[in-house]
Amino acid sequence: MKICCIGAGYVGGPTMAMIAKQCPDISVHVVDLNQARIDAWNSDSLPVYEPGLDAVVAEALPRNLTFSTRVDEAIAESDMIFISVNTPTKTFGVGAGRAANLEFIEKCARQIARVSTGHKIVVEKSTLPVRTAEAVKRILSSADNGATFDVLSNPEFLAEGTAVDDLLNPDRVLIGGESKQAIETLVDIYANWIPRERILTTNLWSSELSKLTANAFLAQRVSSINAISALCEATGADVDEVARAIGTDSRIGPKFLKASVGFGGSCFQKDILNLVYLCEHFGLREVAQYWEQVVSMNDYQKRRFSERIVRTMFNTVSDKKIGVLGFAFKKDTNDTRESAALYVCRDLIRERARLTIYDPRVPETQIRHDLAVACSDLQGQISDIDRKLIENNVTIVHDGYVAAEDAHAIAVLTEWDEFRSLDFDRVYASMQRPAFVFDGRNLLDRDKLTKIGFEIHAIGKSSDESIKG
Ligand code: UDX
Ligand code: ADP
């Protein structure tokens, strides 16, 4: 059997590498328009950082896994085609800032229709608004070369940073579709390593909606605990203690209750906005408003964090140096999409702070590009002032100690393990006084740092000055 995947990104690359590893008899061809990305997949330095992924790719690459830009050829040769292209939130026209931009999906569907002969199964892997499969089906059915298609929805639930484990040992695999035969063909692939009872099959629309709903529920948990973190800071309760106390209730459960500077990543916000757009489309205003609050709370949490930094540092960070630890949206990934760090750094840059940013996996070019985008409007325009501030006031360094040197404060924005094991006596000795720490991930040992002499402010933990009684 031959399969191909259009899109060699954070989802397509790791998912296909795992299928190839687990199914040596299936030939897997991953294609992308981006030559540099394909070259990276074929090199020792993969474009996606994921613990354990190198070994998975290395095992399959010479045997039954190919990365190339030969999109037409891959489609023509394959029995099954996965679509795993990006579906960013629209920045223009109707639904701007909310609806998904389906331009890339539609282009793929047209390309598949043009190139295919015989019968093919097309699998939606990208996160999509509900009923996208309908559009894909209509485009495919316009093929005038006699080709026929079944369309399946097979949303990916892997989380970045743990993708290899999530793919190897998923809670469930979800496959939605109309044709029993097509569904069975895909079930058989996953059944090579996943117990059949964990492979759920549904109709197309349930599958598409389940993906949006799962992400909305997960994001809602983070926003809920973050909302409580604000109350903790005001009252003297400790959000980690509250999370532990409520998490032991088996109906609530302990996972996804870690208060933070805000959730990021390519999925949560985008999927909720998709859900909101969908509800509005169907006239469900109250439902739309309910889910939109999850995103509003997240925006509030990010804003609250940068405001707390400014307020605590005597109401000005202008010309003060702030060492930023972490830029990725979570640990163990080089992905920065929607990272809370983007917005906190943007706010601090606009307050005229000097930032020294260190992330173990995100390169300087990416950080500078992201900051420029974060400071731009929906049309992509950046003001001269913002551009100059990024140019002159942001330094990217390759070491946590250098980031902290001579700084008035450090801000932890990603929970990388290595930040925990920094020698904080050394960090303290190199900083200005008072030495502020703003821990946006509740990663560091507060007692230890306080004893060294730091003034530490963490999420959902009151600092004396903030308890108003
Ligand atoms: C998410 C879903 O988990 C996954 O199933 C889906 O396929 C894609 O979207 P991902 O975005 O890769 O995965 O990472 P996830 O672990 O869900 O974290 C998302 C964001 O929430 C991160 O910024 C993380 O730091 C934050 N988070 C998560 C918290 O702030 N607190 C938590 O308790 C959990
Ligand atoms: P995700 O996190 O969903 O995997 P990414 O942005 O990391 O999203 O990856 C999507 C990939 O899809 C990109 O590498 C992009 O170049 C690729 N892509 C988009 N449209 C097409 C297309 N029509 N043909 C081939 N590749 C495409």
Image (spheres, rainbow, N blue to C red):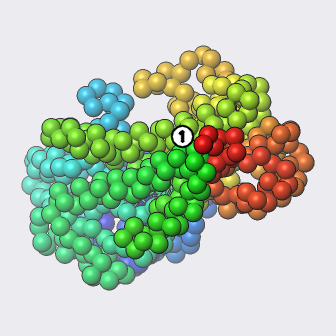
Residue 393 appears left or right of 97: right
Residue 37 is situated, as x and y percent measured from the top left of the image, at: 50, 50
Q: Is residue 129 visible?
A: yes
Location of residue 465 in the rendering, given as x and y in whole percent from the top left corner: 69, 40
Question: At 10% from the left edge and 50% from the top edge, which residue is drawn?
Answer: 141
Q: Which quarter of the image is occupied by the C terminus?
A: top right
Foreground residue among 200 and 291: 291
Question: In the figure, 348 relative to 191: above or below?
Answer: above
Q: For mark 1, what is the residue?
A: 302
231 or 149, nearer to the observer? 231
Residue 246 sits above or below residue 90 on the image: below
Report the side of 358 relative to 219 (left or right). right
Residue visible at 11% across and 58% down? 148
Amino acid carrying label 1: it is Lys
Q: Is residue 125 visible?
A: no
Residue at image position (52%, 75%) is 59
461 and 112: which is toward the camera: 461
Q: Quadrant of residue 277?
A: top left
Instruction: Find residue 194 and report its horizontal and vertical position in percent.
Output: 35, 80
Residue 186 occupies quadrant: bottom left
